[in-house]
């Protein structure tokens, strides 16, 4: 499933994002994230989920969706806190964090 995410979901969502088809990009990335959430006992899926959440964050940032950006930043931070000792950490654009998130 990870290969499918890498060769289909992410590139397709990226194309949709480039074409300003944000709803379709969100749908594809969310579906891929759900695949990862079903396998949270495997670190590669946790890492891929964090990557997908960052992609979703970019889409919601482009749409100025404050609520979704805040939710995603929080979820990425939770993953970072829980899994950083195992080598999983995803940096969030500080501009986005500053605009949409305060702990």
Image (spheres, rainbow, N blue to C red):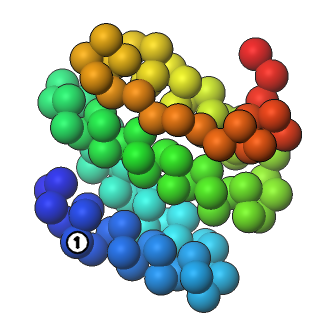
Disc 1, SS: helix
Report whether residue 39 is seen. Answer: no
Q: Residue at x 25, y 64 (%)?
A: 6
Residue 87 vs residue 34, the one in the foreground: 87
Give the position of the C terminus as an image quadrant.
top right
Q: Residue at x 73, y 56 (%)?
A: 61
Q: Is residue 53 above or below residue 8?
A: above
Residue 88 vs residue 45, the one in the foreground: 88
Compared across the picture, whether 45 is left or right of 93 comes to left
Give the position of the N terminus as an image quadrant.
bottom left
**Could you tell me residue 88's position as x and y percent?**
33, 27
Compared across the picture, whether 87 is left or right of 103 comes to left
Q: Is residue 57 above or below residue 21?
A: above
Task: Return the residue at label 1.
Answer: 7
Q: Residue at x 25, y 17 (%)?
A: 86
Q: Residue at x 71, y 37 (%)?
A: 94
Report whether residue 90 is seen. Answer: yes
Task: List the single residue furthest toward the bottom.
Answer: 19
Residue 94 vs residue 100, the one in the foreground: 94
Compared across the picture, whether 7 is left or right of 24 comes to left
**Could you tell me residue 92's position as x and y percent?**
59, 38
**Could you tell me residue 87's position as x and y percent?**
28, 23
Quarter of the image where one finds residue 38: top left
**Could you tell me residue 98's position as x and y percent?**
81, 34
């Amino acid at each position: 499933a990870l290969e499918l995410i890498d060769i289909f979901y992410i590139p397709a969502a990226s194309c949709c994002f480039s074409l300003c088809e944000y709803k379709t990009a969100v749908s594809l990335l969310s579906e891929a994230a759900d695949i990862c959430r079903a396998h949270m006992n495997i670190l590669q899926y946790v890492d891929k989920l964090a990557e997908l959440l960052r992609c979703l964050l970019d889409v919601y940032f482009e749409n100025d969706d404050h609520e979704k950006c805040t939710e995603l930043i929080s979820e990425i931070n939770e993953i970072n806190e829980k899994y950083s000792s195992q080598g999983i950490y995803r940096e969030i654009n500080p501009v986005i964090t500053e605009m949409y998130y305060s702990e």
